[in-house]
Amino acid sequence: MPRMFNFLLLLSLSMLLQTPAIADNTDAYFQPVEIHDAVVTIAEQDTSGDLRFRIVNSSPTKLTIVGVTNTDKVKSKIMGRIDEKNYAELGSITLLREENIDLTTTHIFVRLSSFKEPLKVGEIVDLRLVLSNGKVPFSAHVKR
C-alpha cells in the first residue's frame, strides 16, 4: 500500500509542476494548406494592390476562402475577370479536397485596399488568409 501511495503522490506532483502549453496563434485554425508565390502588385496610390498566389489544399475536406486580412484590418475582395474590361466580386473560393488553384495565372485574384501605410516595392507584408473556419498566416512580396 505505501508503494501505491508514493506513486500517486509523485504522479500528482508531476502533474502540478507541468507548465501549460500555450498556442502562439490562438485565433487561427491551421489546416493542411500551403500558400506559394504570394505577390501583391501595388496600384498607383500604394495603399492598395492585387494579391496573387498558388494554394494547395492537402486536407481531406473542402476549404473555403472568404478573404484576406492583416493586423491593420486591410480590406479584401475576391475578384474574377469576366472579360477584358469587366470584373465581378466573388463571395468566396472553394477548393475541394486535395485540390490546387494557381491564382498567379488565372482570372481570379484578391484585391486588397486600405493599408494604413503605403506599400513599398521590395518589402514583404504579413497577411492572413481568412477561411470559413479560421485564418492561415502567410507573407507576400510587394512589386509594381
Image (tube, rainbow, N blue to C red):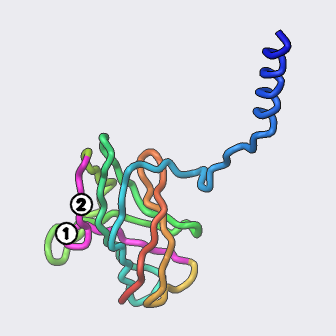
Which disc number belongs to residue 4?
none
Tell me the residue at 51%/69% (across/down).
Answer: 74
Between the residue at mark 2 and the residue at mark 1, the CA separation in whole angstroms equals 9 Å
**Residue 34 or 104: which is nearer the viewer?**
34
User: SS at mark 1?
Assistant: loop
Amino acid type of the residue that numbered disc 1 sits on in the rendered structure: Thr
Left or right for 36, reference 124: left
Which disc number belongs to residue 106?
1
Amino acid type of the residue that numbered disc 2 sits on in the rendered structure: Ile
Tell me the residue at 80%/27% (across/down).
Answer: 12
Image quadrant holding the C terminus, namely bottom left
Give the x, y percent position of residue 26. Answer: 60, 50
- Position of residue 79 relative to residue 59, above or below, is below
**Residue 77 or 143: which is nearer the viewer?**
143
Q: Which quarter of the picture shows residue 65?
A: bottom left
Residue ranking furthest to the top: 1
Q: Which residue is mark 2?
A: 101
Q: Which quarter of the picture shows residue 55?
A: bottom left
Q: Which residues are magenta?
A: 98-115
Left or right for 69, reference 83: right
Tell me the residue at 47%/67% (across/down).
Answer: 75
User: SS at mark 2?
Assistant: strand
- Position of residue 142 relative to residue 17, above or below, is below
